Amino acid sequence: MPDYEFSPASGDRPRSGISKQVLIVLGACLPVILALAIWVGVLSWRQRSMGTTDRFSAIVLGRCLTYTQNVHPELRNQDCKKILNAFTSAFVSKDPCSITKEDYQPLINLVTQTVPCNKTLFWSRSKELAHQYSGIQNEMFTLEDTLLGYIADDLVWCGDPRTSEVKEEFCPYRNENCSSTATSVFWTVVSQKFAESACGTVYVMLNGSGTTAFSKASTFGSVEVFNLHPDRVHTLHAWVMHDIGGVSRDSCLGSSIKELKSIVNQRNISFLCQDDYRPARFVQCVRRPEDPACSTLM
Ligand code: JS2
């Protein structure tokens, strides 16, 4: 039987119909094809109706389980699914520029964790060194060493009134036209709670190689400093750290630290300051042991 070619452009239709055998085979396969199509349809419907776990939710749930089961097993009774649900409920299906502190209150109420007195470490423009230090001095807590900071660190998230999806891309940056984003409000809320629950002597690691070590516009300078309770916190101890082999643009004697001292003293809290606090300098020198600034340490 010759293969027939036809060119649709010529408008020619095949001169001979499909052979009888092909029709029989197609008829026999049709039910299988139909059943397959129905099965795929049901599967995708179930997937949609059950809700797929998006990446953000998977990361937050995974981090929560790691933290409560391994990092701090004393929190093993925390319900990570409830925490995830309270977290996403704070922003999904909402205007991404109009998130409020109250949106996060159910999440804040769910997580009860207290940092021991004298073990709180704030930071400003020195995140990496602060975390390296608290990673070694592991009785010290930065916000990201607490459960809420740990599950959200370095993530971006937002919602959209038109869907119940958790979005990670195309989330608006915080600016004058969008001042209350899901992430910025979250960090303000948890930073405030972190400061409110601090007690004894609290510490802050500042960057003396940046433009100014202390800024009132920073989260530390605008939220945490003003939420320390003077009846719980008696001293704020600042460490102004300088990059190994880097420039020194500010120090304990600089004007920005004088401003920080004034704010703290006005809140009836004592203030101490050290340049290049030695134990933190050791942490810096681990990576640059050959640097002259480190030879005097050894
Ligand atoms: C962490 C994020 C993110 O004392 C520290 C922390 O307790 C933090 O809550 O606030 C302080 C640092 O903020 P600051 O003083 O503005 O310093 P920075 O180096 O400019 O850091 C800006 C980021 C602060 C809030 N924040 N903190 N992990 O993923 C994260 N994202 C944001 N926006």
Image (tube, rainbow, N blue to C red):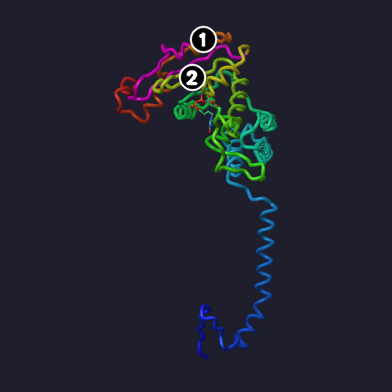
Q: Position of residue 247 (x, y in %)?
A: 34, 22
Disc 1 C-beta below 8 A from ligand 1: no
Relative depth, front residue between 223 and 169: 169
Secondary structure of the residue carrying tag 1 is helix
Name which residue lies at 33% across and 23% down: 294
12 on left or right of 239:
right
Q: Quadrant of residue 189?
A: top right
Secondary structure of the residue carrying tag 2 is loop
Mark sitting on residue 91: none
Disc 2 C-beta below 8 A from ligand 1: yes
The residue under label 1 is 262
Q: Amino acid at mark 1?
A: Ser
| Residue furthest bottom in the image | 1
> Is 241 inside the magenta-drawn segment?
yes
Q: Amino acid at mark 2?
A: Ser
Name which residue lies at 64% across and 45% down: 165
Tell me where the magenta segment starts and ends, as one range: 232-258
**Between marks 1 and 2, how big is the CA–CA gap?**
13 Å
The residue under label 2 is 215
> Is 103 inside the magenta-drawn segment?
no
Q: Position of residue 158 (x, y in %)?
A: 60, 39
Name which residue lies at 36% across and 19% down: 248
Q: Is residue 29 above or below residue 95?
A: below
Image quadrant occupied by the C terminus:
top left
Q: Is residue 20 above or below residue 142?
A: below
Name which residue lies at 47% across and 18% down: 214
38 on left or right of 64:
right
Q: Total marks drawn?
A: 2
Q: Is residue 19 above or below residue 90?
A: below
Q: Position of residue 136 (x, y in %)?
A: 47, 28
Q: Earlier in the sequence, mark 1 or mark 2?
A: 2
Relative depth, front residue between 119 and 17: 17
